[in-house]
Structures are given as structure tokens and as C-alpha cells.
């Protein structure tokens, strides 16, 4: 669907507002998973040209709190383990040197791709069982379509780099990263299943 400049500005503003809302809702940390799922669902609605139903988003956020907290804890655990591994390899405390560091970075990229694919899937599927199904779908998609998975992983990597240069834009970049992940999935991910 081709948009004129006014629609493009409206979409950009809406996506930025979603990013701000997701950032604020993620402040308690245990709500980050629910906030990401709800933000992904809102971005999906924006991307396909629908209105965002705030009541439905509130219900989705509330319904996603428990599973989202578990997902946040799992993601935080993986991130801490990866940071510890990179630190240990870079400091020379474990053998392996550059190959071990490259392997750890590759594992981080794969996990990031699976995580972002899962977030996109959760934004498109709001059923309660969506969390498990989203991770299964994301893992299969990353295995079958590594190029598409790498493109999806690149979206938050670019957003993180931009946020490092201009930290005040971080809340906006959250929304744009979600939108970018949805756009990349729509363009590159081929699947017989609903994505």
C-alpha cells in the first residue's frame, strides 16, 4: 500500500508513541515481555493500516503479564550468560580466543533473531498460547531462512547503535525497531504458516 507524505508522518508519529509507551511500560522490568508483545501488536495494526484499539491493547498487556515476566527472565538470563561468556573469553580467562568469541557472538545473533521473530509473531497472534507457538515458529524460521533471520536481527542491532549515539532517542527507536522487524518479516520471511 502506497502512502502519501501525510500518512507517512502519521505512521511515524504513531510508531514513535508506541515506542514511548513500550519503554514506559517496561520500566518495572518484569512487565517488559508484556509491553513488547502489546507494542508489537500495536505496530502490526499500524503497519496494516488499522486503528490501534487501546482497550484491546490493555487487555492484551494484562493477559501477557505472567508469561511475559517468564520470557523477560529467560531473555535476561541468556543475555547475562552471553555477556559473562564474552567477558571471560575477551579477558583470556578461558581458552579459545577469537574462535570462541566469534562463536559466542554468533550465538547471540541467533538468539536475537529468534527473539525478534518471536516478538513479531506475538504481535500478529494474540492468542494465549502464542508465546510457545511464537518461539517454535521463530526457531524454525531462523533455521530454514537464515538470511531473513539475519535481516530481522539487524533491525534491533541498528536501533541499539543509534541509541548509543543519541541516547535520548531510545524510546522512539523501540517503536521503530518493532516496526522495522515487522516490515522485514513481511518482506523476507516466507512461511506457509500465518506469521
Image (tube, helix red, strand yellow):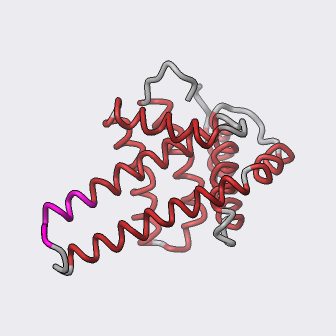
**Relative to the observer, which residue lies in front, 7 or 192?**
192
Q: Residue furthest top?
A: 192
Q: Is residue 109 above or below residue 28?
A: above
Asked whether, in this view, residue 92 is left or right of residue 22, the answer is left
Mark yes or no: residue 103 visible: yes
Asked whether, in this view, residue 75 is left or right of residue 85, the answer is right
Q: Residue 100 colored magenta?
A: yes
Q: Residue furthest right?
A: 55
**Relative to the observer, which residue lies in front, 73 or 12?**
73
Q: Position of residue 30 (x, y in %)?
A: 66, 66
Q: Residue 114's quadrant in the figure? A: top left
Q: Position of residue 2 (x, y in %)?
A: 58, 27
Q: Is residue 103 above or below residue 117?
A: below
Q: Is residue 109 above or below residue 182?
A: below
Q: Position of residue 17 (x, y in %)?
A: 69, 56
* Residue interval drawn in magenta: 95-104
Q: Residue 5's quadrant in the figure? A: top right
Q: Residue 94's quadrant in the figure? A: bottom left
Task: Name the residue rendered at 57%, 24% in the picture.
Answer: 194
Task: Name the residue rendered at 71%, 60% in the picture.
Answer: 21
Asked whether, in this view, residue 28 is left or right of residue 101, the answer is right
**Relative to the observer, which residue lies in front, 187 or 71?**
71
Q: How many marks?
A: 0
Looking at the rendered image, the quarter that the C terminus falls into is top right
Q: Residue 167 colored magenta?
A: no
Q: Main secondary structure of the magenta part?
A: helix
Mark yes or no: residue 45 visible: no
Looking at the rendered image, the quarter that the N terminus falls into is top right
Task: Name the residue rendered at 82%, 42% in the picture.
Answer: 53
Amino acid at each position: 500500500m502506497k502512502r502519501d507524505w501525510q500518512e507517512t508522518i502519521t505512521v511515524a508519529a504513531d510508531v514513535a508513541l508506541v515506542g514511548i509507551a513500550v519503554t514506559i511500560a517496561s520500566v518495572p522490568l518484569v512487565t517488559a515481555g508484556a509491553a513488547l508483545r502489546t507494542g508489537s501488536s500495536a505496530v502490526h495494526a499500524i503497519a496494516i493500516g488499522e486503528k490501534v484499539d487501546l482497550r484491546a491493547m490493555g487487555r492484551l498487556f494484562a493477559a501477557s503479564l505472567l508469561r511475559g515476566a517468564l520470557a523477560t527472565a529467560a531473555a535476561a538470563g541468556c543475555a547475562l550468560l552471553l555477556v559473562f561468556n564474552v567477558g571471560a573469553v575477551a579477558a583470556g580467562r578461558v581458552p579459545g580466543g577469537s574462535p570462541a568469541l566469534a562463536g559466542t557472538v554468533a550465538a547471540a545473533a541467533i538468539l536475537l533473531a529468534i527473539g525478534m521473530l518471536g516478538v513479531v509473531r506475538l504481535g500478529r497472534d494474540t492468542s494465549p498460547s502464542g508465546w510457545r507457538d511464537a518461539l517454535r515458529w521463530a526457531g524454525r524460521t531462523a533455521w530454514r531462512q537464515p538470511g531473513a533471520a539475519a535481516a530481522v536481527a539487524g533491525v534491533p542491532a541498528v536501533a541499539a547503535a543509534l541509541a548509543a549515539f543519541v541516547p535520548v532517542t531510545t524510546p522512539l527507536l523501540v517503536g521503530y525497531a518493532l516496526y522495522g522487524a515487522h516490515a522485514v518479516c513481511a518482506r523476507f520471511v516466507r512461511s506457509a504458516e500465518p506469521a
